[in-house]
Amino acid sequence: MRQMKQSLNAFAWTVAGLWVVGGIGAVFYAKQQDIPARIWMAALPAMLLEASMYIAPGFAAVRERLARLGGWLTPVLAGSAVIPYVLMSVGAGNFRLEWLGALLVLAAMVTLWFRVTPRLPAFDLLFLVFMAGVYLTRVFVEIYVNPSGKPPFDILGRMMWVRLGIISVLLVRKVDGVEFGFLPKWREWAVGTAHFLLLMPVVLPVAWWIGFVHPKEVVFGPKTLIAAAGTFLGMLWVVALGEEFFFRGLLQQWLQRWTGSFPAGLAMAALIFGAAHITARGFPNWRYSLVAMIAGVFYGLAYARGKSIRASMVTHALVNTAWRVFFS
C-alpha cells in the first residue's frame, strides 16, 4: 500500500513538473519559431495532456488502477484517445467528425484485441502487424493537421497509439519479461552504453560505405550540448521506448520462445526491424533498412543482456542521437 501511494505521488509530481517545464518550453519554442498564438494555444493543452497519459503506464500504481477498471478499460482508453484530438482540432479550427470516429474505432480495436482473440501466436503476431501497419501509414498525419504547417501534430496520434498498445499488452495480454519503464537503472545504463560502443565500429563503416550517413561540421558548445541532451531524451522516451517495447520486448521474446532458439529470435526480430524501415524517407530505402537491421541485432543483445527493454532503449537512443548530432 505504501509503495502504491509513493508511486501515485511520483506520478503526480512528474505530471506537475511536465506541465510546468513543458508549458514554458513550448511557449518559448512557439515564440522562437513564430508559430501563431491561435495554433500553439490550441496544441499546448492537447500535447501536455497526451504526454501525461503517455507516461502513466510507467508507474505501477497507475497500471494497477487501470487494471481495476476491468471491462470499463476499453471505453476509458477510447475516450482518452480522442480528448487530445478534440482539444487540438477544435482550437485550430479543423475538427472533423469522421476522424473522431476513426480514432474511436482504432482505439477500441487495440484495447479489445486480447479480450476477443484466443491466446495463440498467430493472433499475437497479427496484433503487432496491426499496430505497425497503422503507425507506418499516414493516418495520423491526415488526422492531426497543423494549419500553420509547423510543427507537425501527428506526434499526438503516434504517442496515443503507442500507449494504447502498451497498456493492452501489459494489462490485458499480461506479457512478462518486458520490464517496461521510462527510467533505466544503473546496470541498464551500463549495458545499453556498452552495446552502443560495440555497435558503432560495426555499423558506422557500413553506413558510410553505402552512403547512408555523411559527417557534418559540429561546433561544440552549450547550444550543441543542450540540443544533444534534448534529442537523447526525446529518442529515449518516444522513439526508442515504443520501438523497443514492440520489437524486442514482444517480437524478439515471442520469436525466441516459439523457435526455442535465442539466435533465431534475435536474427528474425532484427530482420523484421530492418524491413520496417524500408519506407522511411522514401520507398524503397534499402540503406536505412540495412543499417536498422544491423543496429537491431545489438539492440536485441542489449535487451537480452540487460533483461529489460530499458537497456536496449539506451543503446537505441544513443545511436539515434549520435546520428542526428554528427551526421546528416
Image: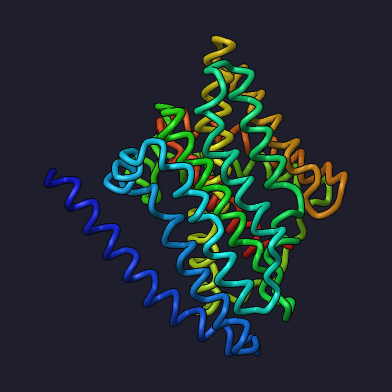
- Residue 151 drawn at (x, y percent): 66, 74
Say which of 161 and 284 sits in front. 161
Q: Is residue 183 left or right of residue 134?
A: left
Q: Is residue 78 left or right of residue 24?
A: right
- Residue 49 drawn at (x, y percent): 45, 66
Tell me if residue 241 can be seen.
no
Quadrant holding the N terminus? top left
Asked which colour scheme the image uses, the reply is rainbow
- Please identify the residue farthest to the left as the structure is shown: 2
Q: Is residue 127 left or right of residue 96?
A: left
Say which of 156 and 117 sits in front. 117
Tell me if residue 245 can be seen.
yes
Name the residue rendered at 66%, 62% in the picture. Answer: 154
Seen in the picture, residue 169 relative to 63 is either above or below; the reply is: above
- Residue 188 drawn at (x, y percent): 38, 41
- Residue 58 drawn at (x, y percent): 37, 48
Locate residue 117: give its quadrant.
Answer: top right
Seen in the picture, residue 1 relative to 217 is either above or below; the reply is: above
Name the residue rendered at 75%, 61% in the picture. Answer: 142
Say which of 199 and 61 sits in front. 61
